[in-house]
Image (cartoon, helix red, strand yellow):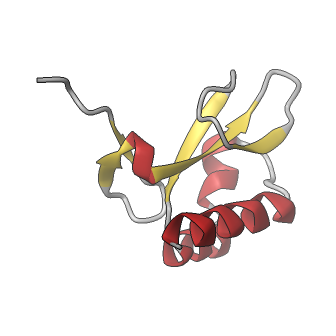
Amino acid sequence: MKKIPMRRCLATNEMCPKKDLLRVVKNNEGKVFFDYSSKANGRGAYIKCSVEAINIARTKKVLDRALETTVPEEVYEKMLKEANDRKN
């Protein structure tokens, strides 16, 4: 039986399977971006793939604190688009 990797959502504080989460990365140059493949190098932070969790992360600025930088608004827009695509 293969072990399922689990990660904690920063917005909801729930443990979820890694494949059900969205990953935001801050790389060595300090650039913050949404990681579609979940394999990019750098410091990663996970958010549950739901509109509610993304909105909580945006209002409480949990990604800003976790990555120790300001996360651009376009990252949240890409995450919302991906969450809507996965839902359908």
Query: Residue placed farthest to the left in the image?
Result: 1
Q: Is residue 86 above or below residue 35?
A: below
Q: Residue at x 81, y 21 (%)?
A: 28
Q: Quadrant of residue 1?
A: top left
Compared with 65, 61 (above or below) is below
Q: Nearer the viewer, residue 4 or 71?
A: 4
Q: Residue at x 31, y 57 (%)?
A: 14
* Residue 14 drawn above or below residue 52: above
Residue 62 image-quadrant placement: bottom right
Position of residue 79 in the picture relative to residue 69 (left or right)? left
Q: Locate residue 3, reporting x and y percent.
A: 20, 26
Name the foreground residue: 14 vs 2: 2
Residue occupying the point 38% across, 47% down: 8
Residue 9 at x, y percent in the picture:
43, 54
Viewed as shown, does residue 65 lie left or right of 17?
Answer: right
The quarter of the picture where residue 27 lies is top right
Q: Residue furthest front?
A: 88
Horizontal and vertical percent for residue 24?
66, 45
Figure check: 4 above or below 81: above
